[in-house]
Amino acid sequence: MTDTVRKPMTLHRLREMHAAGEKIAMLTCYDATFAHVLDDAGVDCLLIGDSLGMVLQGHASTVPVQLSEMAYHVACVARGARHGWIIGDLPYGSYQQSNAQAIASATALMQAGAHMVKLEGAGWTAETIRFLVERGIPVCAHLGLTPQYVHALGGYRIQGRDDAAAATLVRHAREVRDAGASMLVLELIPSAVGAQVTQAIDIPTIGIGAGPDTSGQVLVLHDMLGVTRGRLPRFVRNFMTEGGTIGDALARYVAAVKDGSFPAAAHAY
Ligand code: KIV
């Protein structure tokens, strides 16, 4: 992909891709160099995830991550990216207190270079999403397994397993959509529920362990490059195993998301 062919990604373009049934390829990204490499590989959306607390900082969860640290990494990515849609994750404790806290935190990420912010959770988040969207901040919601609440959830467990839990997930998805969210990350849920939620709402769903029928996919960069230590969740595929450069692995990821071959049955629940 060359600079002359690819224009900067916009929300309008993402909506067009969704309407046309083109899968959206998202990856996490935390610095300028990788932003450049991800752009070259054709990744549509660069998520500065609070997963950086685990993969960069060595914490056991995303809970300790600070807003100032997120703003720093958003700024690094924004300096390196030329095409990708930049999504900054609001970390734990930066939006739960009040709408005033949420807009101050979202403003910090937008001023650092984000095009959209992401926040985790159902129910009460609808009011926060509405507040931010009405004030001109595009929002990505995040349902299913929400890692910031890992202690309340009792660990990194599959969500939405039974009919009642699946129905609740669909209701929550409708609520965040009605509040104005323009994208929804779905994490660690059965494939059938990923499909059900995707059919129930008219905004793109981006799955991570949510099966093949979401509107797009996201993985943690270090996981898909095979450099994460320890046991990885079943939904991860290491794209480096076929050889070549990091750029080749990223291009394989984009191609596999676009043609629907990732995730395969082996990566689904
Ligand atoms: O923090 C993150 O990287 C995320 C993705 C796993 C979706 O939220």
Image (cartoon, rainbow, N blue to C red):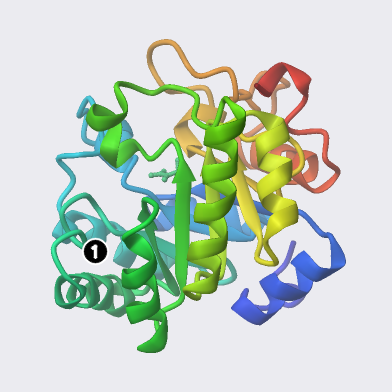
Using the rendered view, name the quadrant where residue 53 is placed. Answer: top left
Residue at left offset 34%, top offset 71%: 127
Residue at left offset 72%, top offset 16%: 266
Residue labelled with disc 1? 71
**Element under disc 1:** helix
- 187 vs 176: above or below: above
- 146 vs 128: above or below: above
Residue at left offset 63%, top offset 24%: 237
Residue farthest along the front direction in this orientation:
164
* Residue 2 visible within the image: yes
Residue type highlighted by circle 1: Ala
Q: Is residue 265 left or right of residue 151?
A: right
Indicate the position of residue 208 as horizontal and vertical percent values.
Answer: 57, 37
> Toward the viewer: 204 or 161?
161
Query: How many numbered callouts?
Result: 1
Indicate the position of residue 72 as horizontal and vertical percent values.
Answer: 23, 61
Q: Is residue 204 left or right of residue 91?
A: right
Q: Is residue 184 left or right of residue 264?
A: left
Indicate the position of residue 101 as horizontal and vertical percent values.
Answer: 15, 71
Q: Quadrant of ligand 1?
A: top left
Using the rendered view, name the quadrant where residue 183 is placed. Answer: bottom right
* Crowding near the residue tagged with mark 1, few <14, some 14–19, many ≥20 C-alpha atoms within 10 Å: many
Indicate the position of residue 95 as horizontal and vertical percent values.
Answer: 21, 63
Quarter of the picture holding the N terminus:
bottom right
Residue farthest along the top direction in this orientation:
231
